[in-house]
Image (tube, rainbow, N blue to C red):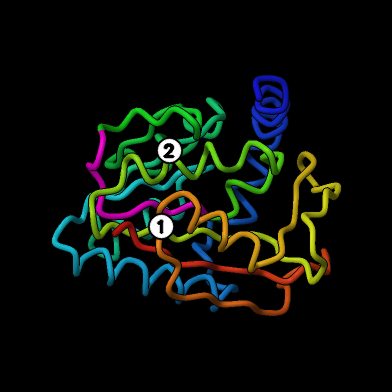
């Protein structure tokens, strides 16, 4: 786990300004993602616990979006350069460097976790540990929204992401992983890609019982 995370951190440290310039619009050109995040925020508010983590927050644009949608949101990311950028861009919000398998959050503290394409670089064998960590920090009734690249095949597919290698997943397989981690998947959205990658874009909403 350490080796691929070190590679991922170094890769994202090297593209901070370009990455931020491409995504600073807070999904203005991605209506499906934007509306799924809006639904997630509404459901988290409905739990009465508005504290939410944007895990793999990058430059902080979605952390700010969650804040604007009424959540007490903070961002966590593996890349120190991304965290530095997020703090400069959104000085009123909290951002901390963290690994996804060891979040600096107490047990059962959060009403929501957003993982927007932030698990895509994790090798399939290591993904259950990351999902278990999301479950640990969620309060009963808390929600996880995870977005990822989807494939029609039966197995995850490794591909050359523009930043660092990543994986696409069969949606049913990913939903099974969520259930195996102790979550209840209850909504999904699958749509044509917004880029030339060719994979479908997938969003899964799950609740901790």
Mark 2 neighbour class, 10 Å CA radius: few under 14, some 14 to 19, many 20 or more? some
Is residue 103 positioned above or below 130 on the image? above
* Element carrying mark 2: helix
Main SS type for the magenta part?
A: strand
Position of 107 compared to 29: left or right? left
Residue 110 in the magenta stretch? The answer is yes
**Residue at the left extreme?**
48
In what quadrant of the picture does the C terminus appear?
Answer: bottom left
* Residue occupying the point 56% across, 54% down: 177
Mark 1 neighbour class, 10 Å CA radius: few under 14, some 14 to 19, many 20 or more? many
Q: Single out the mark in the foreground, 1 or 2.
A: 1
Q: Position of residue 174 (x, y in %)?
A: 61, 59
Stretch in magenta: 107-115
- Residue 133: which numbered mark, if any? 2
Say which quarter of the image contains residue 143.
Answer: bottom left
Residue 118 in the magenta stretch? The answer is no
Is residue 203 positioned above or below 128 on the image? below
- Residue 183: which numbered mark, if any? 1
Q: Position of residue 135 (x, y in %)?
A: 38, 46
């Amino acid at each position: 786990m350490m080796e691929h995370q070190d590679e991922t951190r170094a890769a994202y440290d090297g593209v901070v300004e370009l990455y931020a310039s491409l995504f600073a619009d807070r999904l203005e050109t991605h209506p499906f993602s934007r509306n799924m995040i809006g639904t997630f925020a509404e459901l988290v508010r409905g739990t009465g616990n508005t504290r939410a983590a944007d895990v793999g927050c990058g430059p902080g644009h979605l952390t700010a979006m969650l804040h604007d949608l009424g959540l007490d949101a903070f961002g966590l990311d593996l890349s120190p350069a991304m965290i530095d950028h997020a703090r400069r861009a959104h000085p009123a919000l909290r951002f901390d460097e963290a690994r996804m398998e060891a979040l600096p959050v107490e047990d059962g503290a959060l009403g929501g976790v957003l993982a927007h394409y932030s698990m895509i670089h994790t090798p399939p064998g290591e993904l259950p540990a990351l999902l278990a960590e999301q479950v640990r920090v969620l309060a009963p009734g808390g929600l996880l929204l995870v977005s990822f690249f989807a494939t029609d095949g039966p197995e995850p597919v490794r591909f050359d992401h523009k930043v660092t290698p990543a994986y696409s997943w069969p949606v049913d397989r990913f939903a099974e992983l969520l259930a195996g981690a102790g979550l209840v998947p209850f909504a999904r959205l699958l749509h044509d890609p917004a880029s030339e990658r060719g994979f479908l874009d997938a969003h899964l909403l799950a609740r901790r019982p």
